[in-house]
Amino acid sequence: MNTQNNSTKLAKMAMLVAVSIVLVALIHLPILPMVPFLEYDPADIPILLGSFAFGPGAGIILTLVTAILQGVTVSAQSGAYGIIMHIIATSALVLVSGLIYSREKTKKNAIIGLIFGTLAMVLIMIPANMLITTRFMGLTLEALMPFMPWIILFNLIKAGVNSIVTFLVYKRISPFLHK
């Protein structure tokens, strides 16, 4: 029975990865004209759903698999840089959100987890951009700094929207994920 449960969980996680990649292929748009190279996409929603359903460890696994598959298919133009940044940003979001929600699976903890997960993503992306973006884009830190407020706002909007959608759909989808 345990093997069947593990196989079912793995299949559901694979489905979440597939949905995440399809969402990126269908929906990716710039939301701040000041940083048009940063595009909103809803890829983190299925990953957050998986983190809530199966725990933060599963959320990290979903993040790694999704980021790599997305980075070599629908987002191949961003290359290794995109994969690394996706892993860092989404891992912070799903790890914090999933840890808080897994303690006690209530609406209150879901909200708290998603808020703190959003903040974690925003905060981790500050040094990530300072270290990684400068290297991959060949920018000096001084050249990057005028963009930082917009990068922070972008990450806040992206994580915030994906967290709100996750909160609104999770209870409707969780029966399927837990069946």
Image: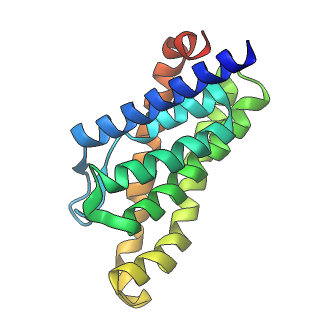
Q: Is residue 121 shown left or right of residue 108?
A: left
Q: Is residue 176 shown left or right of residue 100?
A: left
Q: Residue at x 55, y 54 (%)?
A: 121
Q: Position of residue 126 (x, y in %)?
A: 52, 69
Q: Position of residue 118 (x, y in %)?
A: 55, 47
Q: Residue at x 26, y 49 (%)?
A: 74
Q: Is residue 44 visible in the rendered structure shown here?
A: yes
Q: Position of residue 98 (x, y in %)?
A: 66, 37
Camera-side residue: 35 or 3?
A: 3
Q: Is residue 145 visible in the rendered structure shown here?
A: no
Q: Quadrant of the N terminus?
A: top right
Q: Residue at x 22, y 62 (%)?
A: 36
Q: Position of residue 57 (x, y in %)?
A: 68, 41
Task: Tell me which corner region of the image, top left, top right, bottom left or bottom right, holds residue 116.
Answer: top right
Above or below residue 96? Residue 152 is below
Above or below residue 39? Residue 47 is above
Task: Tell me which corner region of the image, top left, top right, bottom left or bottom right, holds residue 154.
Answer: bottom left
Q: Residue at x 32, y 44 (%)?
A: 41
